[in-house]
Image: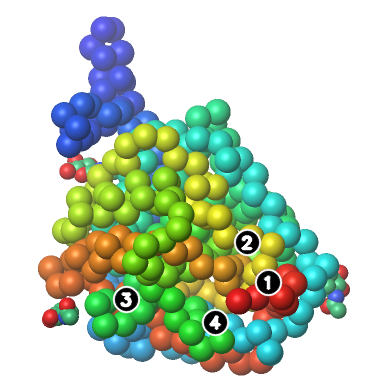
Amino acid sequence: MHFVIFSCQLLGFLRVFAFSQAYIQISQEYLNDILIDRAQDRAAGEYNYDYNGDDWTGLCQIGQSQSPIDLLYDDAIKNNTIPRIQFHHYGESLRTPLVLMNNGHTANMVIPPTRTGQRPFITGGLLRGEYEVQSVHFHWGSNSSKGSEHSINFMRYDVEMHIVHKNRRYESMAEASQNADGLAVLAVMFGAQPQPFSQYYGLNKIFNQLPRIVEYNTNTTIPGQLNMAQLLGNIIVGVFYSYNGSLTTPDCAEAVTWTVFPDVINIPERHIMKFWQLKDSRGTPLINNYRTIQDTNQRPVYYRGVSSLFL
Ligand SMILES: *[C@@H]1O[C@H](CO)[C@@H](O)[C@H](O)[C@H]1NC(C)=O
Ligand SMILES: *[C@@H]1O[C@H](CO)[C@@H](O)[C@H](O)[C@H]1NC(C)=O
Ligand SMILES: *[C@@H]1O[C@H](CO)[C@@H](O)[C@H](O)[C@H]1NC(C)=O
Ligand SMILES: *[C@@H]1O[C@H](CO)[C@@H](O)[C@H](O)[C@H]1NC(C)=O
Ligand SMILES: [Zn+2]
C-alpha cells in the first residue's frame, strides 16, 4: 500500500537538478506539455536551415498561403476599426519553473498555466474565438545577417519572436494545425542597440539562460517569476499587420492567422549574440534559422493602426 502511494508520487514529479544546486519540481502536466511539443516538432522529420527552407518538401513547397512574407504598408488594407488584440491573463505570473530548450531548430519555451491555473489567451484582431498560448520561440541571424522571418517594407530585423497560440476549439496542436483557424501567432521584432533605453526584465531572464542551452537537446529552467506581458516589452500593440499564412517550419501547415507588430524592441547586441552560439543536432552553429520570404499570392494583408504611429 505504502509502496503504491510512494511510486505514484515519484511518477507525479520529475526532479530536475538545477544549476542553483536546488531541486526544482516540474509538474507532470507541464512535463507532458513539453513532451507533446517535442513530439510535434520531431513528427515534422529532420530539417535544417542550410537553404533557409528552400529544400523543404510537401506543403512547404507547393502551398499557396505560406509564411513569412514581406509586409508592405502601401499594399496593406488599412482598417482602424479592426479591434485591438485583447490579452487575457497575460499579466499573471506563470507557474514556475519555466523550461527553455534547444530543440535543434530554435530556443523554445513551452508555456505553463499561470499560478492560478489559467491559460493565457488572446482574442480580437482578425481572430474569431479564443487562442490559448502554447509556446514561445525565436528566429535569428548571424554576425553578418539579420534573422527575422517577416520583413516589413523590405526591412529585416535582428530577431523575431513567435508567441504561438492554439484555438480553444481544438484539442491539440496537431488537430489545430489541420484547420485554417487553428493557430494564431504573434510576431515581435527585436533590434540590436548598443545602449538601449529600456531594460526588459522578463526578456533578459530568457536571454541570460541561452548560454545554458548551447548544445542540442539541452534545457534549463528560468529562475524567478515571469508573465506573458513581459515578453511584449513596451511595444505599441495597437498597431499590427495581420494575414492568413502558415507555420514557417515543416510541415508548413496553412493554419496560422499572423499578427505582426511593426514596433521593435531594442535590446543590447550582447543578448542577440547569445542566440548565435546555439548548435543544432549536427553540432553545427544554429544560425540564420529563418525561412525565405514566400509569395503573397494576392492574399489580403490588413494593417491596423494610425499611420502616423508607423515608424
Ligand atoms: C474593417 O474592419 C471591421 C472589423 O473587422 C469590419 O467590420 C469592416 O467591414 C472593415 N472595413 C473594411 C472597409 O474592410
Ligand atoms: C562570423 O561568424 C563566422 C562563423 O559563424 C566566423 O567565421 C567569422 O569570423 C565571424 N565574423 C566576425 C566579424 O565575427
Ligand atoms: C532537461 O535536461 C535534463 C538533463 O540535463 C533531463 O534529465 C530532463 O529530462 C530534461 N527536461 C526536459 C523537460 O526535457
Ligand atoms: C483568413 O481566412 C478566412 C477563411 O478561411 C477568412 O474568413 C478570414 O477573413 C481570413 N483572414 C485574413 C486576415 O485574411
Ligand atoms: Zn517561428
Task: Name the front one of labels 2 and 1.
Answer: 1
| Residue 76 falls left or right of residue 140 | right
Q: Which residue is drawn at 35% across and 56% down?
A: 108
Identity of the amino acid at label 2? Answer: Ile
Q: What is the crowding at mark 3: few (fewer than 14 residues within 10 Å), some, or many (at least 20)?
A: many
* Separation of marks 2 and 1 at Cα, in angstroms: 9 Å
Q: Mark 3 points at which residue?
A: 141
Q: Which of marks 2 and 1 is nearer the N terminus?
A: 2
Q: Residue at x 37, y 34 (%)?
A: 224
* Separation of marks 2 and 3 at Cα, in angstroms: 24 Å
307 or 25, nearer to the observer: 307
Q: Mark 2 points at which residue?
A: 236
Image quadrant containing the N terminus: top left
Q: Residue 309 carries which label?
A: 1
Q: Quadrant of residue 3?
A: top left
Q: Residue 152 carries which label?
A: 4
- Residue 268, compared with residue 92, is above or below; it is below
- Could you tell me residue 100's position as x and y percent? 32, 49
Q: Which of marks 1 and 3 is nearer the N terminus?
A: 3
| Residue 129 falls left or right of residue 183 | right
Mark 2 falls on what kind of element? loop
92 or 215, nearer to the observer: 92
Q: Earlier in the sequence, mark 1 or mark 4?
A: 4
Q: Disc 4 beta carbon < 8 A from ligand 5?
A: no
The answer to whether residue 38 shows anywhere in this view is no
Q: Earlier in the sequence, mark 3 or mark 4?
A: 3
Of all residues, the one furthest to the top in this rendering is 2
Identity of the amino acid at label 3? Answer: Gly
Assess whether mark 1 and mark 2 are in contact (beta carbons under 8 angstroms).
Answer: yes
